[in-house]
Amino acid sequence: MVVGVDEVMAELAAMLRGARTPKVHDWLVNYVVKKSPHSEDLRQAWLADPDPVVASAGWALTTEGVAKKPEGLDLPALLDTVEAQMKDAPERLQWAMNHCLAQIGIEHAQYRSRAIGIGELLGVLKDYPTAPDCTSPYAPIWINEMVRRQTVR
């Protein structure tokens, strides 16, 4: 039996909607969806999904693209969306958007100051408790630390 693209995408979407615990959700996105030939179509569909948990998967796939395949992504538009929506986003979606913001700042020097500025403006995760010797998830600190580590190598 040959399974069509639409059926595969529908099955992955159903699995994602059923994976409500963060560890299962992250595992599914990172070890199944990211390896799927349909990940770009799913990324686009999930970014626009009204369910913030599903949308967070779209942002996770976008973050992967920012780091590994940025061609085809509109980084300034992503920064605009983060700036407009991240502060009031539900927690899981906010985390995913923040990760994308940091990844843009880390990987793309031409957008670094804008990413840091957005992080400072929004203040998302600024007061997040961080263990000693760990990097804060607050985007300006995260970006600066990861860039510093890249230059030390």
Image (cartoon, rainbow, N blue to C red):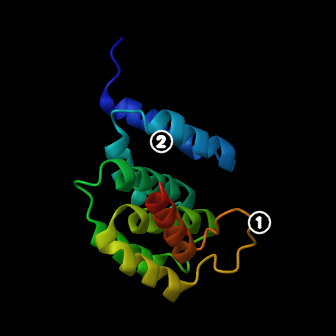
Give the vertical position of 41 relative to 141 (above or below): above
Q: Are marks 2 and 1 in contact (CB under 8 Å)?
A: no
Report the residue that reaches farthest toward the front.
152
Q: How many numbered tags mark residues here?
A: 2
Q: Mark yes or no: residue 12 visible.
A: yes
Q: Which residue is denoted by mark 2 in the rendering?
A: 13
Q: Quadrant of residue 130?
A: bottom right
Q: From what the image shows, is residue 153 above or below residue 80?
A: above
Farthest residue to the top: give it.
1
Left or right: residue 40 versus residue 132 is: left
Residue 118 locus on image (x, y percent): 45, 82
Q: Which residue is mark 1?
A: 132
- What residue sits 41% from the left and 69% below the top? 105
Residue 18 seen in the figure: no
Q: Is residue 125 left or right of residue 7?
A: right
Crowding near the residue tagged with mark 1, few <14, some 14–19, many ≥20 C-alpha atoms within 10 Å: few
Dot 2: few (<14), some (14–19), or many (≥20) neighbours within 10 Å?
some
Could you say whether the residue bearing mark 1 is in a helix, strand or loop? Answer: loop
In the image, taking residue 112 as reference, residue 17 lies left or right, namely right
Between 151 and 29, the one lying in front of the other is 151
Q: Quadrant of residue 78?
A: bottom left
The local secondary structure at tag 2 comes to helix
User: Which amino acid does the dot numbered 2 rest on?
Assistant: Ala
Give the amino acid type for the residue marked by disc 1 in the picture: Pro
The foreground one among 96 and 10 is: 96
Decide which of 4, 112 is in the foreground and name it: 112
The answer to whether residue 134 is left or right of residue 86 is right
